[in-house]
Image (cartoon, rainbow, N blue to C red):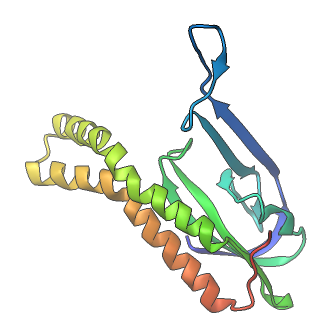
Amino acid sequence: MGAVHGKITSLGNYVTIDTAIIRTDAYGREYSGLGDTQKERFIDGLTIGNRRFGPLSCPSNLYPFFEVDKDVILYTWQHPFLGWPPIRTGIIGVAYPGEKRAYVMSMSQVLMGLVVLALMPLIWLIPAIFIAGFISLVLRTPDGVTAFLTALIALSPWIAAGIMLFNYVRMKGAHPYATTPV
């Protein structure tokens, strides 16, 4: 995917979902641990030309710079296993080439994404073994194919990290005037 060219015809809704695991201690007090809260931000229904995007991950600082009825280049990447659907499109930045304006994720957002994606194969190794094993049992694939499927599933976050970094550098190279909104 990488770059989508066209005119924004609909912005869709910007959705923020907060999830938290609340625990109760022996005295009845409720608390939430460090890793027990999550915030997911996405656009539901962004339309560029005739193409409508479903859940499209978007940093909150970029969404205010989307403008309807303007020609844009939307730089994206694909990331796995961070919600439904299992492979989701994320936004890196938006450029208005006719106006020499562009807005891009900050380097700290990119680095945080890379850290999360670097650690995900540790989490996905066991599910990868189960999924590849199930496929091997059903389709009777050779051991080499099963090993390849296991590696592909477990290392797919690293592939997504490479795609994100490539498209980030590609956007910064194509639009050196790109700024990071605060």
Residue extending furthest toward the left: 143
Compared across the picture, whether 137 is left or right of 173 comes to: left
**Residue plotted at (47% across, 71% down):** 163
Residue extending furthest toward the front: 27
Compared across the picture, whether 118 is left or right of 177 comes to: left
Q: Report if residue 145 is visible in the image.
A: yes
Q: Between residues 45 and 57, which one lies in front from this camera angle?
A: 57
> Does residue 127 sit above or below 61 in this rendering?
above
Q: Report if residue 76 is visible in the image.
A: no
Q: x and y percent of residue 149 in the render?
A: 24, 52
Residue extending furthest toward the top: 27
Compared across the picture, whether 111 is left or right of 48 comes to: left
Q: Which quadrant, please, contains the C terminus?
A: bottom right
- Occupied quadrant, residue 106: bottom right
> Does residue 31 sit above or below 62 in this rendering?
above
Compared across the picture, whether 121 is left or right of 58 comes to: left
> Does residue 166 sit above or below 85 in this rendering?
below
Q: x and y percent of residue 168 in the render?
A: 58, 77
Q: Between residues 149 and 30, which one lies in front from this camera angle?
A: 30
Q: How many marks?
A: 0
**Residue plotted at (45% across, 66% down):** 161
**Residue plotted at (55% across, 77% down):** 167
Q: Between residues 14 and 70, which one lies in front from this camera angle?
A: 14
> Does residue 126 sit above or below 97 in this rendering?
above
**Residue plotted at (24% across, 43% down):** 132
Q: Which quadrant, please, contains the N terminus?
A: bottom right
